[in-house]
Image (cartoon, grey):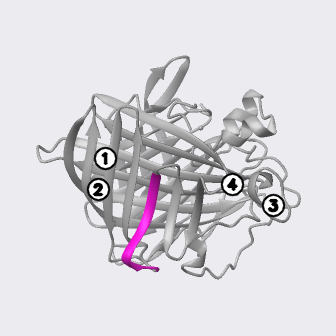
Amino acid sequence: MSDRLKISRRAFAGGAVVLGLGSSFARAQGFAGLGKQADGFATVVPGKAFSFPADLGPHPDYRIEWWYVTANLTDSTGAAYGAQWTLFREASRPGPQQQEWANQQIWMGHAAVTRADLHRFSETFARGGVGQAGVEAKPFQAWIDSWEMRGLDAMNDMTIAPLELSASGADFSYALRLDADHPLALQGEAGYSRKSERGQASYYFSQPFFKVTGHITIDDKPAEVTGQAWMDREWSSQPLAADQTGWDWLSLHLASGEKLMLFRLRQTDGNDYASGNWIRSDGGSEPVPPAEIRMTPMALTEIGARKLPTAWRIEIAARGFAIETIALNARSWMGTSFPYWEGPISFTGSHSGVGYLEMTGY
């Protein structure tokens, strides 16, 4: 598949061509029409008992899911980098899984690297059933074409570590090793992540404690890098409500060793839905009540005809948390089939650290 066959974790688009989702509103909601009815697909309900390694693998009865890694890295000179690796799966229709070319699964991969002075990305697609892309739970492996995330021989199912991660585009590549000594963190309410007050939800867990070593090559110039990474696993059949137009999502590595995930789903009536989880340094995850979250855009970046809030003030008063974010590269635009913004950030204020910001639907 072409590196430039121009689609987002959460804004996953390849199947839109297959499904005919051509309207601007469908494009705002992303791949598979995330706010459309999902009759015939499995539903997300509270109280799921997660099982590992099984839940590292695919869930084809649900319409959409992703395996998503973002990394905040530095080289030996202290220069900052970001790296993104994403594999999406979407079912074009419900029902028993068909074999070979009749299989209804569509796979899409995104990879990107970011520095202060550049942002490079690549995209690739595959059809299910023919071995070109897929995920296996044990031994863990996720792949599309030559891009791969795989567990090493000593991989622990409860930490998803150690892993090797690799991808390449026309003008970049990376090969990274991810290690972790903390268990997976369940997002939302014990892994049940609400997206609205009307029943939309996903199953969602993360590994936010990865330590990274490896190298990134840009324009044939390699750099050894180290840093932190965050992996998200999420699946659903209808994760958005029909009147939600996109989201602003952050994953934050606090200098204290704590982690924070926050998102805001924008609604047409202005009553945006917020959610988050505070992850303690020991790995325990606590939901942040939506009413406590304030996400305020502070600066806009114009990219083409779009104006995007690439700097934010984030406040959780009950925790004494008040920070302002700055993008490593405010032009971290993913010009993929359904375009979105995604890139590394840093933050200062009551707490300091680094993280990632993703914005869709602008």
Q: Where in the figure is residue 311, as x and y percent of width and height?
A: 40, 36
Q: How crowded is mark 4: few (under 14 residues within 10 Å), some or many (20 or more)?
A: many
Q: Where in the figure is residue 355, as x and y percent of width and height?
A: 36, 51
Marks 4, 2: nearer the viewer:
4
Marks 3, 2: nearer the viewer:
3
Q: Which residue is drawn at 12% across and 48% down?
A: 76
Type of amino acid at the residue the image marks with label 3: Gln
Span shown in magenta: 147-157
Instruction: Find disc 2 in the rendering and name its residue.
Output: 351
Can residue 288 be seen here? The reply is yes
> In whole angstroms, how far apart are the C-alphas of marks 2 and 1?
8 Å
Q: Describe the element under mark 2 as helix, strand or loop.
A: loop
Mark identifier at residue 98? 3
Q: Do the residues labelled 3 and 4 touch (CB within 8 Å)?
A: no
Instruction: Find disc 4 in the rendering and name its residue.
Output: 128
Instruction: Find disc 1 in the rendering and name its residue.
Output: 347
Q: Are marks 2 and 1 in contact (CB under 8 Å)?
A: yes
Compared to residue 211, the image places residue 246 above or below, namely above
Q: In which quarter of the image is the C terminus?
A: top right
Precedes in sequence: disc 3 or disc 4: 3
Q: In which quarter of the image is the N terminus?
A: top right
